[in-house]
Amino acid sequence: MSHTQKWRPISPALRRVQDKARANRSEAFTSLAHHLTEAALLHAYRGLKAKAAAGPDGETKASYGKGLKRRLTELQGRLKSGSYRATPAKRVYLDKPDGSQRPIHLQGIEDKIVQAAVVEILNSIYEGDFAPFSYGFRPGKSQHMALQSLQTVLQKGQVNWVLDLDLKACFDRIEHQALMREIRKRVVDRRLLGLIQIWLTVGYREAGRKRQKQTRGVPQGAVISPLLANVVLNEALDKTVHHWRKQHATGEVYIVRYADDAVLSFEHQADAEALQQVLETTLSAYGLELNQAKTRLVRFGGNYPPNGPGKSDTFDFLGLTHIAGRDRTGRYLVKRRTSRKRLKRSLEQVRRWCRRHRHQPLAWQWEQLSIKLNGHYAYFGIRGNLAALSRYRYQVWHTWRGSLRRRGQTSRKDRITRLLNERFVLPMPRITRPDNWLPINPGYLLGRAGCGKSARPVL
């Protein structure tokens, strides 16, 4: 049902759990905590990011690695005896493009290790339950897979309307009781449920303040939070859409979701409006709410001209603006460009970086900016987006040159320009992802089975 490669757990024991979970979608597992072995903790430690910020204990991956075997043995012993205790997270705030701040919870290193090991266990169960159109924070799936699936839907599907869904503070609003109720459908191991409950309620500390308990939501920044959010969204969003389109839809309905960002495509406007009302009711049962300011129903598709009255609108998904356009021969073509908001944010980050490091050696600045540009090309270098990449490179070059001119009063514009154009040349834009929409038969995508019976698509 999915075009992506299926994920397989590392441990042979977890592979048996995965096979059993796929064979019986309603079975609840009573014994899972014994999979938290020292080998599983070591595998989880190796998967942690080396440059991640230190938590409340001040430990980083490198510092915890000194005497690693002894520490993991002691940690596994505490898990086995039930004496393991989670540490309240350190809460910091990150600036958002709209001027607000996003709270991030920095976990202790041991909490990260145990959570990563538990995620490996839960993935063995839930990977068979999650819908194939869900791509966020899942092993073997990525943002570009979601973008490719969406382009396939818009290009080949019977799409006239697009509902761009956005959930308001999804991670902060999830009800704990609703979340644990969903987990207990598949996991009844008391030790594992106890660990999850501890991580949800242990709370956080801010600078100079007492510990604050968390009564709702999953901590942003925790290793296990994306999986827990997917468990809720799978029930509240994915299953609701899939069941509704099989029983109530009058036309084609498609969905592509990445974490809390989802795009629903419709053949008829009435279906879009009806399903949006159903989702508002369903999401409220889990403490979730649609962000009405960002949720938009727009006209989109090949049946509407790109210009003039009644034209197709545009929408953003995962940093790219999707446009219903035409190719050189006049045929319908879904075009994708770097969104203005994402481009503006990236350039602002480059400006701050250049201002902060303009007195560093020129060769070092060139090396660091080259890394940033190559990273930008790696994500936004999709087919048809070369013009936006070229504008981004020019703006970075222009910002860098302006920053270097302010290094001193004797800086010469012509000399700096010659250096940047001849010796320290920034990487040229290139298409890193030339793949187009998925090579799926249009009849299959539109829900027409080969035997002549109707079938709903998986997207």
Image (cartoon, grey):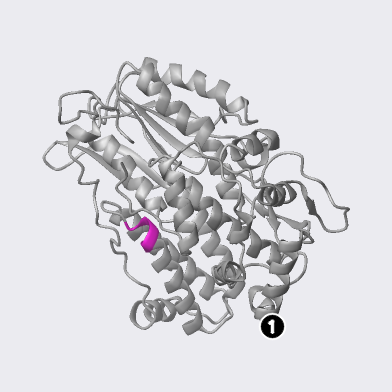
**127 to 174, vertically: above or below:** below
Left or right of residue 228, residue 202 in this image: right
- Give amino acid for label 1: Gly
Q: Say which of 153 and 228 sits in front.
A: 228
Q: Secondary structure at mark 1?
A: loop
Nearer to the camera, 185 or 313: 185
Image coordinates of residue 67 in percent, x first then y, are 69, 83
The residue that label 1 is drawn on is: 67
- Residue 416 percent across, percent down from the top left: 44, 79
Whether 316 is drawn above or below 289: the answer is: below
**Position of residue 352 measured from the top left corner of the image (x, y, whole percent):** 58, 64
Q: Is residue 374 above or below residue 331?
A: below
Say if residue 447 shows up in the picture.
yes
Q: Quadrant of the C terminus?
A: top left
Residue 435: x and y, percent? 24, 54
Decide if residue 317 is on the left or right side of residue 358: left
The region drawn magenta spans 377-381
**Horizontal placement of 346 versus 81: left or right?**
left
Instruction: Name the residue located 31 percent from the left edge and 38 percent from the top edge.
Output: 323
Residue 393 falls within the magenta-colored stretch: no
Q: Main secondary structure of the magenta part?
A: helix
Q: Is residue 380 magenta?
A: yes
Could you tell me which residue is drawn at 59 percent across and 70 percent down? Answer: 45
Q: Residues within 10 Å of mark 1 (few under 14, many from 20)?
A: few
Q: What number of labels is visible?
A: 1
Residue name at image x 41 percent, y 62 percent: 376
> What's the residue at 68%, 41% (across, down)?
217
